[in-house]
Amino acid sequence: MIPNQWYVILESREVKAGKPVGVTRMGEKMVAWRDSSGTIVIQGDVCPHRGAALHQGKILHDHIMCPFHGFEFDSTCACQYIPANGKNAAPPNILHAKTYKSAERHGHIFIWWGEEQTTYPDVPIFEELENGYYFTDYKERWSVHYSRAIENQLDVFHLPFPHRTTIRRGNRTIADGPVVKMEGGEMQIWVHNRVDDGIPAKRVSELSEPNRPPFLHFRFPHS
Ligand code: FES
């Protein structure tokens, strides 16, 4: 993955109050849970004591309790309580679980994947979502590098073939243009597919200025 970026790791609705959720993202085991104010907490899913999976533990107010020896960690991942030592014994500072900087926007949970920063950039969200667009999620597991999945989403030429009975029915194999524009760090693509009527695919210069929203948006990393 490209470092120093925000990445979505879960949908907000997947993490309910009082129930830690274990996931593997970026090849690392993580646990997601909510504190008593509902704020999301993302930690490494490995207890710093003996390595038990924290997501199998419990949420007790603003702490996550390890299922193995009952150590409790707060939302900064510092150990606050070791039952075997007693409630008045201060846990050693060394017992610190890994924490990920996290944010929640538009129904998704993001983590900052990279070096710690003094200030973090805003979570990048498409302008349309800020302006009240409705959207839905769809999940599918592909056994490819994520960059190939992005490339595939931007490839407007393949649609009439593998998707000929669904999203690109109609045998519209000709792809005029497509019109591609850069808006800041965002690539916007207008697709013009049509049936092959003998007129070869038109160049962008032969197409009129699009008067509808782009069909595809791609926001580049670090933009
Ligand atoms: S392994 Fe977590 S408290 Fe011991």
Image (cartoon, rainbow, N blue to C red):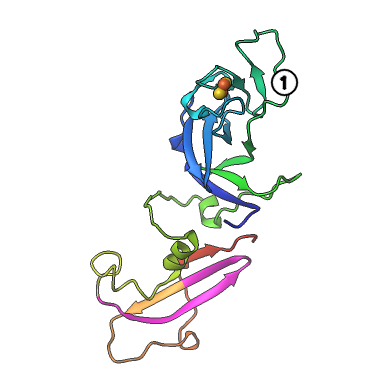
Specify whether residue 6 is painted magenta: no
Ligand 1 position by quadrant: top right
Three-letter amino acid code at the position of disc 1: Pro
| Foreground residue among 178 and 209 | 178
Secondary structure type for disc 1: loop
| Foreground residue among 62 and 148 | 148
| Foreground residue among 32 and 38 | 32
Q: Which residues are magenta?
A: 171-189
Q: Is residue 2 left or right of residue 115?
A: left
Residue 195 picture location, percent across and down: 28, 81
Specify whether residue 182 is painted magenta: yes
Confirm or reject: label 1 Cβ below 8 Å from ligand 1: no
Q: Hey, which residue is sitting farthest front in the picture?
A: 50
Q: Which residue is mark 1?
A: 92
Asked whether residue 107 appears in the rendered view, the answer is: no
Q: Is residue 14 left or right of residue 51?
A: left
At 41% across and 74% down in the image, what residue appears?
191
Asked whether residue 150 appears in the rendered view, the answer is: yes
Residue 179 picture location, percent across and down: 48, 78
- The part of the image, by quadrant, that contains residue 105 is top right
At 71% across and 45% down in the image, what residue appears?
116
Residue 177 picture location, percent across and down: 44, 82
At 38% across and 76% down in the image, what residue appears?
157
Q: Is residue 85 above or below residue 35?
A: above
Q: Hey, which residue is sitting farthest right in the picture?
A: 118
| Foreground residue among 146 and 166 | 146
At 65% across and 60% down in the image, what residue appears?
222
